[in-house]
Amino acid sequence: MLTQREYAARRRDLMAQMVPNSIAIIAAAAEAVRSRDTHYRYKQATNLAYLCGFPEPEAVLVLMPGREQGEAVLFCRDKDPLRETWDGFRYGPSGAVQQFGMDDAFPIADLDEILPAMLEGKSRVYYAIGKQPEFDRQLLGYVQQLGDRQGRGALPPGEFVDLDHTLHEMRLIKTAAELRIMRKAATISAEAHCQAMLRCRPGLYEYQLQATIEHHFADCGAAAPAYTTIVGGGNNGCTLHYIDNRARLNDGDLVLIDAGCEYADYAADITRTFPVNGRFSREQAAIYDLVLAANNAAIKAVRVGQPFNVANDTTVAVITAGLVDLGILDGEVNELIERGAHRPFYMHSAGHWLGMDVHDVGDYKIQGEWREFEAGMVLTIEPGIYIAQSDTSVAAKWRGIAVRIEDNIIVKKRGVETITRAVPVERREIEKLMRTAQR
């Protein structure tokens, strides 16, 4: 878990990049209604969680560099014994100071009175406009109030600047404390994939493997899946975001599982593909080995100073050449790459940033150029090949095969660290693990 010292360092780092006489405002995520009077499990806005770790809705974090009474101020729900009986514990303003290291805290009910005064006369407001429309209107209403009172001496803030750019650049480079948590999330997720391999057999249903995985997440203290778990048997694996997970797992098919937990606010994101009956067929093995070769080559290509797209370009080159070797594509490899001949079978990119969000923040390009890898970045490597049952352009023996292999890697000063290989990735190791459950 992260300490108050870590959160305080992040706030200091952000405020050091703000101009004098400025203010930063970060609102908590709103609660989402599932139906009538039931809500989805609450998920805090990751920017606010990043800066203070406060877990409750109806909160606003305000940072004011140089404020004599304290630079970090949190507005949050007041203590309320009746509401806490129904909805659970609330920290209240005193808890925000004691447990989360705030310099000052006020009830959220006082926001309308206090925040306009904090905004008055500021040269710049750092705020992510457009992410939370309801709070946008509230905040702009405060600015309008100040504008309406200009004739009586009120002074509205000078300009708004998008907070996300600065904050997302900070979030892109992980600290040692963050990396420890991400390794833990990866380990829990890898173990869950192993449990699914051990349980799998023909006749089970996709949702039963989903239950196995998510039970392990919860059993290890993870808050929840980091995203909706994908369990696609056979042709269902060809649907990239398949989440129905209701079909029966059939003998002779592969099953593709994309699942990762969220642990202490950080996500893991792992995909493994394995045979339902524990034995790869010849065609499944050929496709699997090609995807694994692309995965390994891309991981090897990621190094400090290399551009982000090197991983994707590497996977495209390996997969295109391999599809030619298998007779699925026909032509000269470079020309096929040039015209994107792989796209009907490999239609997504090779990876994305990973962190508090499973598709984490941070620009992939800077001024139109691919950004270079730096130590402390974390990303996924996830090549795949998908040959739909309906694709009559390829021989019948290949149809219905879907393989994706996804690992999480940390970029280090020298090389990378792959943090998800606690779950087997080599075919023989997968088959060996699955045989142990059949004895």
Image: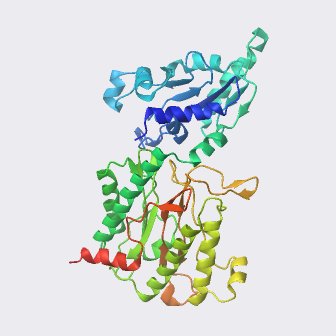
Outermost residue to the top: 152
Residue 120 higher or lower than 368, as above or below: above
The location of residue 274, given as percent across then percent down, is 39, 75
Q: Is residue 210 visible?
A: no
On screen, residue 68 versus residue 160, left or right, reads left
Q: Residue at x 62, y 27 (%)?
A: 138
The location of residue 403, given as percent across then percent down, is 48, 75
Q: Residue 147's quadrant in the figure?
A: top right
Q: Is residue 234 visible?
A: yes
Q: Residue at x 59, y 68 (%)?
A: 301
On screen, residue 340 versus residue 297, left or right, reads right
Outermost residue to the front: 414
Q: Residue at x 70, y 25 (%)?
A: 20
Q: Residue at x 65, y 37 (%)?
A: 163
Looking at the image, what colour scheme do you see? rainbow
Pick whichever, 422 or 393, lies toward us. Answer: 422
The location of residue 221, given as percent across then percent down, is 32, 48
Q: Residue 13's quadrant in the figure?
A: top right
Residue 131 higher or lower than 74, as above or below: below
On screen, residue 170 versus residue 398, left or right, reads right
Image quarter hosting the C terminus: bottom left
Image quarter hosting the N terminus: top left
The location of residue 78, given as percent across then percent down, is 43, 21
Residue 118 higher or lower than 160, as above or below: above
Outermost residue to the left: 439
